[in-house]
Image (cartoon, rainbow, N blue to C red):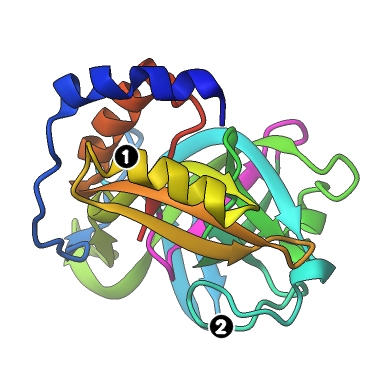
Amino acid sequence: MKKCTFIYLAVIIGLFGCTPRSTIQAPSSRTILLPEDRRGRLPRPYEVNGKRYYPLPDAFGFTQVGNASWYGEKFHGRPTASGEIFDMHKRTAAHKTLPLGTFVKVMNLSNNRSTFVRVNDRGPFVKGRIIDLSYAAAREIDLIRSGVARVKIEALSEEVGKLEHNGRPQPLVEVADLGEGEFTIQVGAFLEIGNAMKLAERLRVIFDYVEISPILDENRRTLHRVHVTKSKTLNQAEGFKKKLEEMGLTGAFIVRI
């Protein structure tokens, strides 16, 4: 953490005030008739264990473009954020803000190869990366050798039934509001807990919610992450993040709790 970060703390007080404490609700979901595209066609489904999943238009869905990385043997056998044991040979992923259990299509933009994964972990806790793929998923899109690649990710929705429409059965899909939930912002991560505590104490002058959250890195060292603010929506969290970055906390990023 740069020393100049703390110069801005007094200014942040004036911009933010105190973050109010409030009750956070889980993302809500609803069932809709799967929308057709402009040509009257339905998107191609993806099948997993006998269930079908569909990409959705931007009005209902979630897409993101950025850098992907992967993780494997060093985390194999460890618990994930969902409580599952990480298996590098299964197609799973870690994402900062999507709800655990969300199915996602990931396309490597350098070769147009795609994989289909389920989010069961949190991460990557590195600015500039949007998703961490398991070894199996990374291998499918030829990510192993390069280590990092620019990708497009697209959240998918499960088919939960069919409804007669325009003379033919059309899928009903469950749509979750992925922008609702409980979000916080990570402003730093330290190997030395004393450094995390110093930053946390300074931020407690500004925010009602400041927390130090430990996590093991790939070398089994404990990183002490400093989180500030709680938001009910992703948009609200984005607003806090933007202001934090303007004040010098350029490494800040949003995490769903």
Q: Is residue 252 left or right of residue 173?
A: right
Residue 223 picture location, percent across and down: 61, 57
Magenta stretch secondary structure, dominant? loop
In the image, 184 versus 166, the foreground residue is 184
**Amino acid type at mark 1:** Leu
Q: Is residue 114 left or right of residue 240?
A: right
**Rendered location of residue 8, percent (x, y):** 35, 18
**Around disc 1, counting alpha carbons within 10 Å, would you say few (fewer than 14), some (14 to 19), or many (20 or more)?**
many
**Could you say whether the residue bearing mark 1 is in a helix, strand or loop?**
helix
* Quarter of the rendering containing residue 247: top left
Pointer 2: what residue?
84
**Dot 2, crowdedness within 10 Å: few (<14), some or many (≥20)?**
few
Q: Nearer the viewer, residue 228 or 75?
A: 228
Q: Is residue 233 magenta?
A: no
Q: Is residue 190 left or right of residue 156?
A: right
**Depth check, front residue: 188 or 183:** 188
The location of residue 198, given as percent across then percent down, is 45, 44
The picture quadrant where one finds residue 78 is: bottom right
Secondary element under disc 2, as helix, strand or loop, is: loop
Above or below, 237 relative to 30: above
Q: Residue at x 54, y 46 (%)?
A: 195
Q: Which residue is mark 1?
A: 203
- Between 166 and 235, which is closer to the camera in this rendering? 235
Please tell me which of labels 2 and 1 falls first in the chain: 2
Q: Which residues are magenta?
A: 98-112
Query: Residue 216 — which label?
Result: none
